[in-house]
């Protein structure tokens, strides 16, 4: 197949921390691919290779960086100066874009990329390949409004959105949270903004859920609670509180449990949790490739409520208890409050988390699920349908 016969999509995911960015990028890529569509993903995720990549999708791994503060990043593995690492990343991104010559370039979350590493590529497209459509994909909530506005003013993001992006896709529902209002988006930019709705994930069949429950020894009259903290880098406190709750009644647990710590939880913390869980007969995993299968089998998922995790849970229609972190960003708390208002999730503020309250909330969801189930059943996840429609419109215009 010649280059002209294919439609090339280049996706950028900076991936400095956690699993959310690479999982969201993979979900989008899988639904935009087609026999005549190639998707190439630029990613700094150290675990990109653990995912299975379907035909027509591949990735270019750029050196990983890890966030120390909102503005400070250090190389994840190689021992070089941070600015040198960013230079390497920037050169790989630019060279890939120039060689691949995509029809569509989708940037995840960071308008300029990490430390402005995507800016030269955006400028090159505008100057040398103006037919390439440039898309910024933003999760529904970035942070509290004042922090986002100050950050975007400081970095000149409003001008970049105006000058270098064809469209901005908001992966959320405007009635849940409206960044146009919250972040003081000027009219010239808001006209480019499209609310896609939340991004759905694969939904396994009922047989897959039954097999999963059987695998973990969950009988017909028993309940299964899954606890997951995404990448897990800051998930220890939640896992510790859950295990403390279970240890208070080790022989009369009202449900079965599975814990998935995430691959970025510090090893010593993870091993300590695994040892405690083993004494309680609780199954544990560091990383679970097919999260949708275990979530569909669970009766309740306890999580920190990152964007990606919420999409996965709502796709399965599973009840959810969220304990959102409040640092370094308020994003998870704001989302949990917005979803809770519509009874799509229940939540506990981070500073209120305790073994007793955790147990009360979980049992309430298990014993009184109907209001949440009804709200979830009405909630439509339209993100991928919208994106496919935009892609079809782009191709028709190029036709």
Image (cartoon, grey):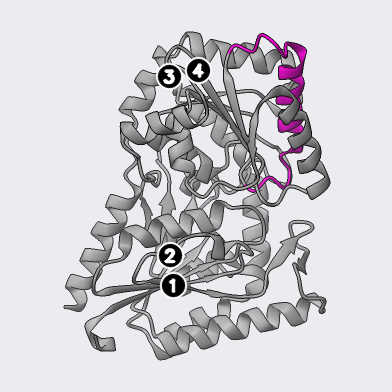
The disc, 1 or 4, on the residue closer to the chain's N-terminal end is 1
Reading the image, the residue beneath label 4 is 223
Q: Earlier in the sequence, mark 2 or mark 4?
A: 2
Toward which corner of the image does residue 247 lie, by quadrant?
top right
Q: Earlier in the sequence, mark 1 or mark 3?
A: 1
Q: Residue at x 32, y 31 (%)?
A: 206
Q: Residues within 10 Å of mark 3 (few under 14, many from 20)?
A: many
Of residue 133 and residue 356, the one placed in the foreground of this image is 356
Residue 371 in the image, given as x and y percentages of width and height: 41, 14
Write down the residue under mark 3: 372
Residue at point 50%, 38% (across, down):
310
Residue 379, located in which quarter of the rendered image? top left
Q: Is residue 167 above or below residue 233?
A: below
Q: Which residues are magenta?
A: 231-254
Instruction: Classify mark 3: helix, strand or loop.
Output: helix
User: Is residue 186 visible to us here?
Assistant: no
- Quarter in which the C terminus is drawn: bottom left
| Residue 58, disc | 1
Q: In the depicted view, which residue is nearer to us: 319 or 118?
A: 319
Q: Is residue 5 above or below residue 317?
A: below
- CA gap, disc 1 and disc 2: 6 Å
Choose mark 1 or mark 4, whichever is in front: 4
- Ranked by sequence position, the earlier of labels 1 and 2 is 2
* Whether residue 90 is situated above or below residue 57 in the rendered picture: below
- Point out residue 141 in the picture as x, y percentages from the top left corner: 54, 45
> Number of numbered discs present?
4
Check residue 53 in the rendering and tell me which mark sits there, or answer none. Answer: 2
Label 2 residue SS: loop
Q: CA distance from mark 3 to mark 2?
A: 34 Å
| Precedes in sequence: disc 4 or disc 3 | 4
Q: Position of residue 320 (x, y in %)?
A: 51, 26
Whether pointer 1 and pointer 2 mark residues with C-beta atoms closer than 8 Å, the reply is yes
């Amino acid at each position: 197949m010649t280059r002209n016969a294919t439609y090339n999509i280049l996706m950028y995911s900076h991936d400095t921390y956690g699993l959310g960015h690479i999982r969201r990028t993979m979900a989008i890529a899988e639904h935009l691919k087609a026999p005549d569509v190639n998707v190439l993903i630029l990613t700094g995720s150290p675990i990109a290779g653990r995912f299975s990549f379907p035909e027509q999708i591949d990735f270019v791994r750029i050196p990983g960086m890890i966030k120390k503060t909102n503005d400070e990043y250090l190389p994840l593995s190689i021992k070089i100066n941070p600015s040198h690492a960013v230079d390497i990343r920037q050169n790989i991104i630019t060279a890939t874009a120039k060689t691949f010559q995509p029809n569509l370039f989708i940037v995840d979350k960071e308008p300029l990329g990490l430390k402005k590493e995507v800016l030269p590529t955006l400028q090159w497209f505008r100057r040398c390949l103006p037919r390439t459509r440039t898309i910024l994909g933003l999760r529904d909530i970035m942070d509290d409004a004042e922090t986002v506005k100050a950050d975007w003013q400081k970095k000149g993001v409003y001008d970049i959105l105006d000058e270098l992006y064809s469209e901005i896709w908001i992966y959320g529902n405007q009635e849940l949270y409206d960044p146009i209002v919250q972040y003081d988006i000027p009219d010239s930019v808001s006209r480019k903004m499209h609310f896609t709705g939340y991004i759905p994930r694969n939904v396994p069949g009922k047989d897959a859920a039954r097999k999963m429950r059987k695998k973990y020894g969950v009988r017909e009259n028993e309940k299964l609670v899954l606890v997951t903290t995404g990448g897990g880098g800051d998930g220890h406190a939640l896992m510790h509180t859950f295990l403390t709750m279970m240890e208070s009644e080790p022989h009369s647990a009202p449900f079965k449990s599975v814990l998935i710590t995430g691959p970025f939880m510090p090893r010593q913390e993870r091993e300590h949790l695994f040892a405690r869980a083993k004494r309680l007969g609780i199954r544990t995993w560091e990383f679970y490739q097919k999260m949708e299968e275990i979530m569909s089998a669970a009766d309740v998922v306890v999580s920190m409520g990152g964007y990606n995790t919420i999409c996965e849970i709502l796709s399965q229609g599973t009840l959810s208890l969220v304990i959102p972190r409040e640092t370094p960003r308020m994003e998870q708390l704001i989302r949990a409050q917005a979803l809770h208002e519509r009874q799509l999730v229940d939540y506990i503020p981070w500073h209120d988390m305790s073994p007793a309250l955790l147990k009360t909330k979980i049992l309430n969801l298990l014993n009184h699920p109907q209001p949440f189930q009804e709200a979830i059943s009405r909630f439509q996840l339209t993100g991928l349908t919208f994106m496919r429609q935009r892609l079809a419109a782009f191709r028709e215009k190029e036709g």
